[in-house]
DNA sequence: GAGGATAAGTTCGTTGAATGAACCTACCTG
DNA sequence: CAGGTAGGTTCATTCAACGAACTTATCCTC
């Protein structure tokens, strides 16, 4: 979406943000990264994104310091993409967007976000009503909601059905 | 950005939200609507968006119930576009995005958002630290920050330099 | 009442990005 | 050494964005 030529003139931090994360697919890649997706192929099958576009987005996000590319094995050389602090700071945005989508569009509870320490469902600002604190991203537990399909087609979606914390790497069956 | 074909399979409220507001320019149109821009021509000069794209976005947002098209004078017939409740509910998303942009990209304070009742600058969740409440959108006052240019080229930007509340219609000099 | 201005579009040719299929390169396993 | 896997690149086609020109309806001014 974004393009320097156009948005750059805007003198607005929202426009600047959209320059970086406003393109098609970009926010979904970041969402997946929060859900623990880290590998090229997992993004690919989970999102159904064209390969060239994924490569371009991963490269852009890495060069913007939102994802970090890190070698997780030599021989064959394999890299994974992990959210940096700058990327993790996008959580409130994603949370607000998801909440709006749920309340004004889908009307379904597809995923539940809880405070891992106490099990309470998070408030709109990732606050824990029980503990009275804002919950840090790694302390958020994601569990499938009542309206989420139980038998998705792709292996990544299936792996994501297991309750787990945000950022915790997803374990995909090699099947 | 968004496209039913692709994102629809996602079973995710974030993806659904992006279907509706994820296309290029869309969020900037909504941002302008919060700032009080209501007319086709004002959007046009403020955003520098191609006319056809603006017409398409306004039509889409209206049909999604995010903007409402309302006649403000007969003869010549003139319409303005105003945020609905569903549109106003996007404020937390825009706020989160703007905050992220400021903290991680621009590093400048271009606009200050305050609680109109007490003048306190808003917290990250549009909360008022002084009053201890979440501030409703119409009670948010926008004033230019220290890093915002004082003499912008287009008349809409100039009109927006005056402190005003969110949603309150901007008054553009016919000059 | 003729000429010009304004608001809100539509039309259209050109450019640029997204798509999907095929191909490429290491390396590993049986 | 045949086949598979991960992570890409290349390329032809399709689709959206761009920007300039044109349209329509009305008002304002002389």
Image (tube, coloured by chain):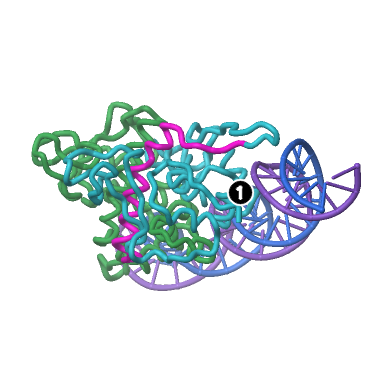
Chain colours: A green, B cyan, C purple, D blue
| Circle 1 crowding by C-alpha within 10 Å: few under 14, some 14–19, many from 20 | few
Seen in the picture, residue A34 relative to B102 is either above or below; the reply is: above
Image coordinates of residue A18 in percent, x first then y, are 43, 56
Q: Residue at 36%, 42% (x, y): give it.
A: B91
Seen in the picture, residue B55 relative to C5 is either above or below; the reply is: above
Image quarter where the C terminus of chain B lies is: bottom right
Q: Nearer the viewer, residue A38 or B132?
A: B132
Would you say residue A42 is visible in this rendering?
no
Q: Classify residue C9 by image quadrant.
A: top right
Q: Is residue C6 left or right of residue A101?
A: right
Q: Residue at 48%, 40% (x, y): give it.
A: B20
Seen in the picture, residue A91 relative to B79 is either above or below; the reply is: below
Q: Which residues are magenta?
A: B79-108
Image coordinates of residue B127 in percent, x first then y, are 23, 43
Q: Tell me the SS state at disc 1.
A: helix
Q: Is residue B129 left or right of residue B169?
A: left
Seen in the picture, residue B55 relative to B65 is either above or below; the reply is: below
Q: Nearer the viewer, residue B74 or B39?
A: B74
**Which chain does tag 1 point to?**
B
Residue corresponding to mark 1 = B41
Q: Nearer the viewer, residue B57 or B149?
A: B149
Q: Nearer the viewer, residue A73 or C1?
A: C1
Q: Residue at 57%, 41% (x, y): give it.
A: B58
Image coordinates of residue A174 in percent, x first then y, are 31, 49
Q: Residue at 60%, 32% (x, y): give it.
A: B71
Q: Classify residue B86 by image quadrant.
A: top left
């Amino acid at each position: 979406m974004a393009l320097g030529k156009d948005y750059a003139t805007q003198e607005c931090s929202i426009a600047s943000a959209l320059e970086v994360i406003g393109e098609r697919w970009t926010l979904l890649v970041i969402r997946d990264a929060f859900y623990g997706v880290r590998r090229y192929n997992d993004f690919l099958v989970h999102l159904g994104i064209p390969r060239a576009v994924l490569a371009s987005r991963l490269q852009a996000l890495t060069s913007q310091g939102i994802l970090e590319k890190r070698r997780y094995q030599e021989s064959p050389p394999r890299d994974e993409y992990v959210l940096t602090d700058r990327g993790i700071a996008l959580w409130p945005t994603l949370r607000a967007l998801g909440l709006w989508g749920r309340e004004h569009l889908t009307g379904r509870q597809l995923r539940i976000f809880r405070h891992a320490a106490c099990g309470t469902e998070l408030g709109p600002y990732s606050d824990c009503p029980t503990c009275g604190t804002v919950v840090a991203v790694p302390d958020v537990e994601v569990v499938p909601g009542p309206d989420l399909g139980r038998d998705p087609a792709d292996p990544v979606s299936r792996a994501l059905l297991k309750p787990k914390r945000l950022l915790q790497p997803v374990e995909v069956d090699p099947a």
